[in-house]
Amino acid sequence: MGLIKILLTAITLLFLHAFEANVHGLLVPDYYRESCPILEEIVREQVEIAVLKDPRMAASLLRLHFHDCFVMGCDGSVLLDSSGEMVSEKEAGPNINSLRGFEIVDKIKGLLEEACPFTVSCADLLAITARDAVELRGGPRWEVELGRRDSLKASLSGANQFLPAPNSSLEILVSKFKAQGLTIYDLVALSGSHTIGKSRCLSFKQRIYDGEDEPDYYKRNTIFQQILRSICPISKRDDALVPLDFMTSARFDNRYYRNLLEGKGLLESDNVLISQDTGGEIARLVWEFASDQQLFFREFATSMLNMGSINPLTGEQGEIRRNCRVLNSW
């Protein structure tokens, strides 16, 4: 009887810990330990299947979490479809014909509703899939902090306003990260997510054909520019895909930062970390991450937790959607 009492006490304390954390707006790693103990197993298996079928899906799932958190906070709003007067964030300039992975999220959510009905939020699901996607491509693993609830609205204007564009200047990048409570350290670390995935020619074509106006920094690697021009002709193939990291595009590593130092960053928003850093602090971080992969992994994990803590809905706020695309009331 004594052992049973101890076990019951431990279970009660765990439940109270998760309940208290949610009431006070805190996120905790073990939030679903009692309510949905097989959560991470279900998510991991489905993300692994998806990434094996399409290695690019790892970057897509990571990007979904990023694009969710930068608009009203990490609340699953990016997953909502348009309905009535609400226009989906999927229609925003940075998202349309670009964001992917919604079907993977739908499938995982369906399995979770069978196993643990009305329990796991779509916002938390995005955070876990992002972590698993990174790890499955060779990146770091971290304990995802959970307890978010789902938004009752989407913000098309917010998606157009707050998400960085691929041609953003360094000043704009710093400003947009600062608006979310993130530092330049977070900016440099999270930019490292471009070590996996691909980008459409349309996102960087202007830069590679405006050579006369580019700083000397971009002219250091004319062979790289010629390769990009061969893939992305000036008047066509806007939707052709190019790896963000030409060297190890399917592996999450620190090669992205070495590319920047060699003048081989694909997007303007990548290269400005070096070319427009007049103070030298951001360039110093690029050098540090380029020379120490484990340092990059540690800081990336920390910055992912920082990003995942942007304005979460907790307690009685929002809802736990049964279908990530629609509100429960629809």
Image (cartoon, rainbow, N blue to C red):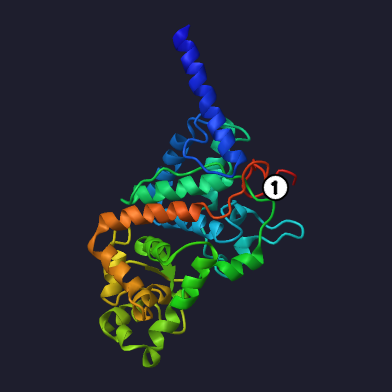
Secondary structure at badge 1 equals loop
Instruction: Specify whether 22 is left or right of 253.
Output: right
Q: Residue at x 54, y 23 (%)?
A: 12
Answer yes or no: is residue 61 visible.
no
Q: How many marks?
A: 1
Q: Quadrant of residue 211?
A: bottom left
Residue 143 vertical position relative to residue 209 in the rendered view, above or below: above
Q: Residue 159: percent from the left, percent from the top?
A: 60, 65
Residue 69 vertical position relative to residue 281 in the rendered view, above or below: above
How packed is label 1: few (under 14 Cα within 10 Å), some, or many (20 or more)? some
Furthest toward the top, the residue is: 1
Q: Quadrant of residue 193?
A: bottom left
- Give whichever of 237, 146 is nearer the camera: 146
Q: Residue at x 52, y 26 (%)?
A: 13
Q: Residue 54: percent from the left, percent from the top?
A: 40, 53
Q: Residue 229: percent from the left, percent from the top?
A: 36, 81
Residue type at mark 1 is Leu
The residue where tag 1 is placed is 327
Furthest toward the left, the residue is: 291
Instruction: Specify whether 18 is left or right of 156.
Output: left
Q: Residue 209: percent from the left, percent from the top?
A: 40, 86
- Give whichever of 22, 72 is nearer the camera: 22
Furthest toward the right, the residue is: 84
Answer yes or no: is residue 320 visible.
yes
Instruction: Specify whether 264 is left or right of 1.
Output: left
Instruction: Specify whether 150 is left or right of 301.
Output: right
Q: Residue at x 67, y 43 (%)?
A: 319
